[in-house]
Amino acid sequence: MDYNILLYYCYAQIEDLEAYREEHHLFCVQNNIRGRIIISSEGLNGTVSGLKEDSEKYMAYIKADPRFADTEFKIDQHPEHAFAKINVRAKEEIVHSGLRHLNPRENTGKHLEPEEFKALKDQEDVVVLDVRSNYEHELGHFKNALRLDIDNFRDFPEKVKELEHLKNKKILTYCTGGIKCEKASAFLLEQGFEDVYQLHGGIIKYGFDAGGEDFEGKCYVFDNRLAVDVNKVNPKTVSKCFVCATLSDRMVNCSNPKCNAHVPICDACGWEMEGACSESCKNAPQRRPYNGTGYYQKNTNGYNPYKGLYQKPNADKIKTTLHVQSDT
């Protein structure tokens, strides 16, 4: 496998937001890094792919900046790029929560390494809390985990009131890569929960370091793989085909772009329904051609990787940046 997929985040203050976004985008273009990167005044959040050599340069570029020196990367191998484009965007938050006032650098739940999480999760005074969205939980989750009925993480703060009766318990939060737990656990502490923890590195790191034991199903990911295996110890399929209700962990996006529901659909129903989640979506005039994957890449004809830059590419600037990285 010649490519790496990198999942990372870092909470850090960025004052020169647009200037840094510009620089970051240019570096990605010049090193054939593709993916989605969010830059905010509170930090970075990204999932990207690139050749192993290029991804090593990218990680070195991030870590060479003192603001992001402690960034941790979850690294997976893949036979090809997991993205067709590079998108580097400036936003209010690196993960949309509506909790901009909380700074995980100052206060957040205690970080548990995967083996520590595994040792604690089944204790009687512990509640394992999934802070992801419904469709992610339904595809895969830790055994006996509690979930809140949310379609988006921004709904999390409103739902926390449903946990009031659990304030005397240890709350172990988890998510895909750890970023949502930073804010979720900080908010729980703000709401008066005293014993709050978070799975360091999320489900992905747990799979790497603890074999994924007791994680049932697959983990939804935000690239063209859609779902990945986590559990190498006692794997189990828990999700059901949205159409026929047989067990299936084959995640797709509905072929009707106006729906685009993230649902498990078995291979047989996928072909029978032409990638749609319902008859109405199957008959939708705008339905996308189904190719068996359930992942629909936007048309890349005429794609310009420099789109979104305010300045034209500055070759001297890029060469200088690369030279600095090679010397560090």
Image: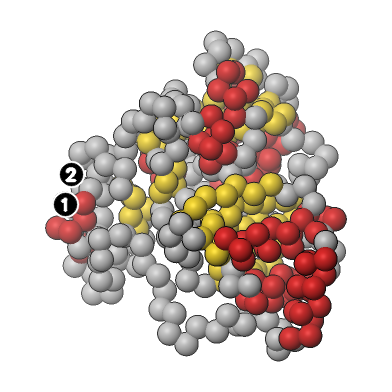
Give the image location of residue 194, x and y in percent: 73, 22
Q: Amino acid at mark 1?
A: Ala
Residues at badges 1 and 2 in contact (C-beta under 8 Å)? yes
Disc 1 is placed on an element classified as helix
What residue is shown with label 2?
Answer: 244
Q: Is residue 323 left or right of residue 233?
A: right
Quadrant of image for the C terminus? bottom right
What residue is shown with label 1?
Answer: 268
Q: Residues within 10 Å of mark 2 (few under 14, many from 20)?
A: few
Q: Residues within 10 Å of mark 1 (few under 14, many from 20)?
A: few
Give the image location of residue 74, x and y in percent: 60, 47
In this rendering, the label closer to the viewer, 1 or 2: 1
Residue at 33% of width from left, 55% of height from top? 252
Q: Can residue 164 be seen here?
A: no
Closer to the chain start, of discs 1 and 2, is 2
Q: Is residue 196 above or below residue 185?
A: above
Q: Amino acid at mark 2?
A: Cys
